[in-house]
Amino acid sequence: MMMKKIFFLVLIPAALLSARPCGAQADLYSFPDIGQAKAAAPNEPPADPFMKSLALRFGLDEAVLARAFSKGVGRREMIELILISRGSKDPLPGLIDERRKGAKLAGLAKSRGLDPRKIRSEARRLAEEVGKALSGNGPGPRTAGTFEPLQGGGTGYAATASSGPERGGK
């Protein structure tokens, strides 16, 4: 019986003391404030590789192009807006806003004294040029293995390994 009293006298204070958080234990299960997490998150969408290359080619702010692309401005449309901006010396963000309000690209070009057909053809050419430059950078298509004719002119075929990047292929 005495043992039970001692056990409870020691156990109850120990349980109460362990329930109070210590200095280091107070932050053990703390979670960040949701408002802080939202403020720390970047507001800019990631840039498309096509838009990155346009920004480099024309010396423009990548964030402006990425924002416009994320809001639905197409690739060739963006090139046409850039060319109109260059030809008229108007700021690109203003042209993007006009376009988003419903202005036609040909109307934007004509109102600034530019030929819409020349701008459209130049935009096509630039889009193809940038697209080809980007397609050459990535890895080639993977193959699961192929059969090639034997070197000695025989009638059989030899199986080859896959040609993915981990195998030294493109």
Image (cartoon, grey):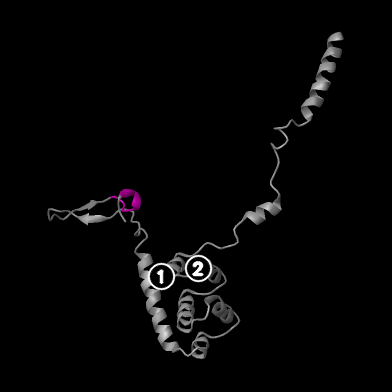
**Residue 164: x percent and y percent?**
34, 53
Q: As drawn, is 5 to the left or to the right of 60?
A: right
- The mark total stands at 2
Q: As drawn, is 31 to the left or to the right of 151?
A: right
Q: Residues within 10 Å of mark 1 (few under 14, many from 20)?
A: few
Please tell me which residue is depicted at 52% across the width and 89% down the height of the picture. Answer: 107
Q: Quadrant of residue 39?
A: bottom right
**Residue 155: x percent and y percent?**
16, 56
Q: As drawn, is 60 to the left or to the right of 22?
A: left
Q: As drawn, is 17 to the left or to the right of 28?
A: right
Q: Which residue is mark 2?
A: 61
Residue segment shown in magenta:
161-167
In this rendered view, identify the residue nearer to me: 150 or 50. Answer: 50
Q: Which residue is mark 1?
A: 57
Cα–Cα span, label 2 and label 1: 11 Å
**Residue 169: x percent and y percent?**
30, 53
Amino acid under disc 1: Arg
Q: Quadrant of residue 28?
A: top right
